[in-house]
């Protein structure tokens, strides 16, 4: 069996003040690359350390040396992979440089393209009594103001709602999107390695909310400990999945085999008239019933029908109960770098010693680390998607 050697590619493209693309520069050597992806943060980050004692150089079309001027807002693309067996480099980060060290050796920090949302402002109010607007429509409008491409796969359902007067003036697009996420309980993030901003319900992989124009990503299998798991997987709708290897370290994983929460109460308050509210509870029954209760408050623009408002309160209570009881495995593990695993993707954990943990989990966050001395590794933050109801 051939040995696969880790490989990287860092491409930097100059962008002038008018937004025009200039020369591109490929980094030849690095001392460290770190890429942080997270479904809980709208903006992924990267840092590249370049072990140079002189300014980077490139050549023009005539072969003459040119100084490479790396500056904030230049584009950067980072790819990882392995040399051998038809393995191609996979982009894990595309974005804009946010900081360059003033001294050598060179350190470059970057944020993905959601950085544009931090530097563009919203100038409008949205929705009126006669023409209410859906939050998904507002998100589409303000993201496009920042030059970003929205990807909203579930408009007008599962938490989306209408407003008759949302004033977002004098806020950045990033601040406005945070407000929309708070009101709808949806999440938003720049899709890793792509060009779109996702705005929709949590756990997009499980719900089938991946971009339609992209191939369905594979479900990778990671093993804890030694041995193989022998089980019948014919009923698994997500199979087949692809063995990737054993986990190097799982010391930060904490397994929980009980459902600790018995009852969750949602108090839903009308966003326009805070004196109006409805309350609904979701209760877990059966042998797995836990002992803990919790309550939370959410804001929602009430409909004219009380039944619809109560239905929304119950939906949110049930969703929160499912999430609280879905932990099973929490924490993180470290393994060999796999550039095809992105945050929000599902993967499978298996253990021959503890078969009760065998299940599908979500990559809440993925941190890639590459260095000549340490090789290519990644740390995956784990969470269990809620049970489907």
Image (spheres, helix red, strand yellow):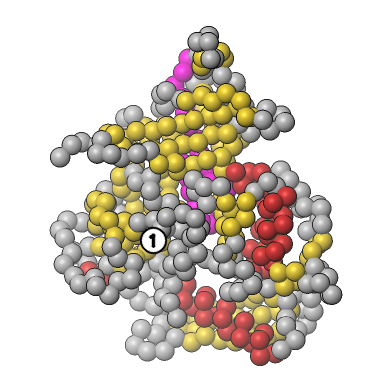
Task: Judge whether 242 appears above or below 20 on screen.
Answer: below
Quarter of the image with the C terminus is bottom left
User: Residue 217 sits in which quadrant?
Assistant: bottom left
Secondary structure, mark 1, is strand
Task: Judge whether 130 appears above or below 351 on screen.
Answer: below
* Residue range highlighted in magenta: 35-53
Picture coordinates of residue 190 (x, y %)?
Answer: 56, 51
Residue density around tag 1, few if under 14, some if 14–19, many if 20 or more, within 10 Å = many
Quarter of the image with the N terminus is top left
Picture coordinates of residue 261 (x, y %)?
Answer: 45, 79
Q: Is residue 4 left or right of residue 303?
A: left
Q: Residue at x 60, y 21 (%)?
A: 69
Q: Residue at x 57, y 78 (%)?
A: 316
Picture coordinates of residue 357 (x, y %)?
Answer: 28, 68
Query: Is residue 36 magenta-colored?
Result: yes
Q: Is residue 149 left or right of residue 1?
A: right
Q: Pick whichever, 186 or 84, lies toward us.
A: 84
Q: Is any atom of residue 24 visible in this view? A: yes
Q: Residue at x 49, y 21 (%)?
A: 105
Q: Is residue 219 left or right of residue 183?
A: left
Q: Pick whichever, 23 or 62, lies toward us.
A: 62
Q: Is any atom of residue 381 visible in this view? A: no
Query: Is residue 244 magenta-colored?
Result: no
Task: Judge whether 231 appears above or below 3 on screen.
Answer: below
Q: Residue at x 39, y 85 (%)?
A: 289
Q: Which residue is mark 1?
A: 346
How many marks overall?
A: 1
């Amino acid at each position: 069996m051939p040995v696969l050697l880790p490989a990287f590619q860092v491409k930097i493209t100059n962008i002038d003040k008018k937004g025009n693309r200039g020369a591109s520069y490929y980094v030849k050597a690095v001392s460290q690359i770190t890429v942080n992806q997270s479904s809980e943060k709208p903006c992924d980050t990267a840092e590249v350390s370049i072990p140079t004692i002189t300014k980077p150089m490139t050549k023009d079309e005539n072969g003459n040396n040119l100084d490479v001027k790396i500056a904030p807002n230049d584009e950067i693309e980072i790819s990882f992979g392995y040399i051998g067996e038809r393995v191609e480099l996979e982009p894990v980060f595309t974005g804009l440089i946010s900081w360059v060290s003033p001294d050598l050796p060179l350190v470059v920090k970057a944020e993905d393209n959601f950085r544009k949302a931090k530097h563009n402002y919203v100038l409008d109010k949205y929705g009126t009594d006669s023409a209410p607007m859906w939050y998904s429509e507002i998100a589409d409008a303000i993201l496009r103001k920042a030059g970003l491409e929205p990807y909203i796969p579930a408009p007008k359902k599962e938490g989306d709602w209408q407003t008759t007067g949302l004033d977002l003036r004098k806020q950045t697009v990033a601040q406005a999107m945070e407000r929309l996420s708070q009101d709808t309980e949806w999440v938003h993030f720049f899709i890793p390695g792509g060009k779109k901003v996702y705005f929709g319900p949590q756990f997009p992989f499980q719900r089938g909310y991946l971009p339609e124009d992209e191939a369905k990503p594979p479900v990778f299998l990671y093993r804890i400990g030694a041995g193989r798991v022998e089980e019948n997987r014919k009923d698994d709708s997500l199979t087949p999945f692809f063995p990737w290897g054993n986990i190097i370290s799982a010391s930060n994983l904490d397994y929980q085999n009980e459902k600790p929460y018995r009852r969750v109460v949602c108090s839903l308050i009308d966003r326009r008239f805070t004196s109006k509210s409805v309350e609904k509870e979701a209760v877990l029954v059966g042998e797995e019933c836990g002992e803990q209760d919790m309550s939370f408050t959410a804001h929602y623009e009430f409909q004219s029908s009380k039944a619809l408002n109560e239905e929304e309160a119950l939906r949110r209570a049930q969703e929160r109960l499912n999430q609280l009881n879905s932990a099973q495995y929490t924490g993180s593990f470290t393994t060999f770098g796999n550039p095809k695993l992105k945050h929000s993707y599902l993967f499978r954990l298996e253990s021959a010693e503890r078969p009760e943990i065998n299940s599908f989990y979500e990559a809440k966050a993925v941190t890639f680390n590459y260095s000549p001395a340490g090789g290519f590794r990644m740390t995956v933050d784990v969470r269990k998607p809620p049970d489907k109801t």
